[in-house]
Image (tube, rainbow, N blue to C red):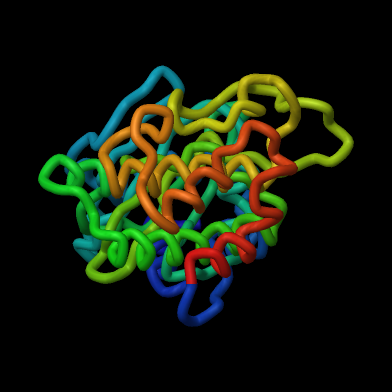
């Protein structure tokens, strides 16, 4: 397959969600170019994209902003070690409150994920200036619930909901970063890897049991409280109705939390 044709195929990824076109992986398989997708994507990224800036880096990987040399479109590139199963699931989903995942390639435990770049401010950045009102908080969290409904419908658990992983794109809240996400496996007693952010992660994420969607409701409860008070609920609980929502979301026993995200949405409406 020629470099020009590879570039053309990759440029199509910007339009997949709207036109339901084949992914780049499907095209490579169809034409049987005998090129592993990880190798192809690595080569395409070197030849057809230019780095713009590094957004963040951790022991598990890094996130960079890259620009397609021909179209000028910017994308987010994730390189990380671990399991990319949730990103692969997201290739087939479209939701205004989740980023569009354009391509996923793995080689052993090394992963490359190309996704849309979302311009906006994270909740973490916005909280440095001021707290959110109850009305603003409710609106944002209801949108995050919609994102979680999509994730949970595919048996995925985000496991790292926090202000840094929520960005406001105009009036839309978008949930980011699925590096810590996993698929819920009913036959497992506990998670195979402890991941999450202290202060936001549910107790079961520390090996007490396997995490299920209710772990995300715990983190969402912490997020609600931080948006309203700037504090963890153990230090200062939000007042009124939203404080009662936080209290139920953050119960240690998952069975005493809301049963699912739809029940939480009802409580917030």
Q: Position of residue 237 (x, y in %)?
A: 38, 39
Q: Position of residue 100 (x, y in %)?
A: 45, 62
Q: In the figure, 212 relative to 68: above or below?
A: above
Occupied quadrant, residue 125: top left
Towards the viewer: 31 or 132 = 132
Of all residues shown, which one is farthest toward the bottom? 19
Q: In the figure, 60 relative to 83: above or below?
A: above
Residue displayed at 33% across by 41% down: 226
One can see residue 10 in this view: yes
Towards the viewer: 83 or 174 = 174
Towards the viewer: 135 or 192 = 135
Of all residues shown, which one is farthest toward the left? 129
Q: In the figure, 119 relative to 123: above or below?
A: below
Tell me: 10 left or right of 49: right
Residue displayed at 88% across by 36% down: 187
Residue displayed at 69% across by 57% down: 154
Q: In the figure, 235 relative to 86: above or below?
A: above
One can see residue 44 in this view: no
Q: Position of residue 4 (x, y in %)?
A: 37, 61
Of all residues shown, which one is farthest toward the front? 240
Towards the viewer: 102 or 251 = 251
Residue displayed at 32% across by 68% down: 172
Q: Position of residue 227 (x, y in %)?
A: 30, 47
Tell me: 66 left or right of 224: left
Occupied quadrant, residue 116: bottom left
């Amino acid at each position: 397959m020629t470099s020009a044709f590879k570039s053309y195929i990759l440029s199509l990824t910007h339009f997949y969600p709207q036109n339901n076109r084949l992914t780049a992986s499907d095209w490579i398989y169809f034409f049987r170019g005998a090129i592993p997708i990880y190798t192809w994507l690595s080569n395409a990224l070197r030849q057809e994209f230019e780095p713009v800036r590094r957004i963040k880096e951790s022991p598990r990987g890094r996130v960079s902003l890259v620009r397609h040399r021909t179209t000028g479109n910017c994308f987010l590139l994730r390189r990380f070690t671990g399991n990319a199963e949730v990103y692969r699931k997201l290739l087939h989903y479209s939701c205004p409150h989740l980023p569009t995942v354009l391509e996923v390639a793995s080689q052993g435990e090394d992963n490359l994920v190309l996704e849309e770049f979302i311009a906006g401010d994270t909740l973490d950045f916005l909280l440095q200036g001021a707290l959110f009102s109850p009305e603003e908080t409710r609106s944002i969290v209801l949108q995050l619930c919609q994102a979680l409904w999509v994730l949970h419908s595919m048996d995925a658990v985000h496991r790292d909901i926090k202000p840094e992983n929520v960005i406001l794109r105009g009036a839309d809240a978008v949930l980011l970063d699925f590096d810590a996400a996993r698929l819920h496996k009913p036959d497992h007693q506990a998670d195979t890897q402890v991941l999450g952010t202290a202060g936001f992660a549910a107790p079961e994420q520390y090996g007490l049991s396997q995490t299920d969607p209710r772990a995300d409701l715990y983190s969402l409860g912490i997020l609600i409280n931080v948006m309203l008070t700037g504090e963890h609920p153990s230090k200062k609980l939000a007042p009124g109705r939203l404080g009662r929502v936080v209290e139920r979301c953050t119960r240690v026993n998952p069975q005493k939390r809301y049963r699912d995200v739809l029940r939480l949405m009802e409580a917030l409406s």
